[in-house]
Image: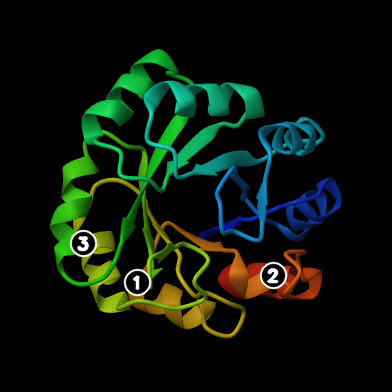
Amino acid sequence: MVKVKICGNTSKETALAALSYGADMLGFIVNVSGSKTSITPEQAREIISALPSGETVVVTTATDAQEIKRLAQETGVSTIQYHGEVSPETIAKIKDELPNIAAWKVIHVKDESAIDEARKYESIVDAILLDTAQGGQIGGTGTTHDWNISRIIAGDYSKPIILAGGLNPDNVEEAIRVVKPYAVDVNSGVTNSDGSKDLEKVKLFIERAKGK
């Protein structure tokens, strides 16, 4: 069964609700300018400390190793999702120093060059997350990319592939059918205009992704 990550959590109540609906992973966007679901490290830690279980992921655009390590330690997450231009060498260094924290690298699928870009990180990270980049905005675009490229990566790579980018309750089943990813990741597709989560959409997304 495909795993589900609900990203952009901004409150303890919605995070707990997502877990109760069957979410496997919860994402927290921390200190990312321009994101309507970005929160502070302190807010993320407060929510994470109240969770009974589940994998927790800090989403960061930071590129400085010390800043990234500090962010992971301050929030208490189990996984770092690298959205910034961070080299494989930097990620490997952070993993050596924080061996209990997993690393995911975001690859933006603009064209087939994403296939080779993902390959650079395959031996270093624990998973690769395929997302959409649009107009300079990374993540949370609400726009899908070419799933056929993602399907090639998911079929050829040894590490788990997480599919993101424009997913919502209406297209997640088709996305899973085409790409066959390890997990799917949603933020804007279940988020209200004020940045809060639409819990009915969260529940429906999880049910459809898991074939319930």
Instruction: Between residue 159 and residue 117, name the one nearer to us.
Output: 117
Q: What residue sits right under mark 1 in the picture?
A: 179
Residue that appears at 17% across and 49% down? 119
Per the model, the C-alpha gap separating discs 1 and 3 is: 15 Å
Q: What residue sits right under mark 2 in the picture?
A: 191
SS class of the residue under badge 1? helix
SS class of the residue under badge 3? helix
Crowd tier of the residue under label 2, counting other residues whose Cα lies within 10 Å: few below 14, some 14–19, many 20 or above: many
At which x and y percent is residue 212? 66, 73
Foreground mark, 1 or 3? 3
Quadrant housing residue 110:
bottom left
Q: What residue sits right under mark 3 in the picture?
A: 114
Quadrant housing residue 129:
bottom left
Q: Are the residues at dot 1 and dot 3 in contact (C-beta closer than 8 Å)?
A: no
At which x and y percent is residue 175? 43, 77
Residue that appears at 78% across and 39% down? 47
At which x and y percent is residue 178? 35, 78
SS class of the residue under badge 2? loop
Q: Is residue 211 visible?
A: no
The amino acid type found where label 2 is placed reads Thr
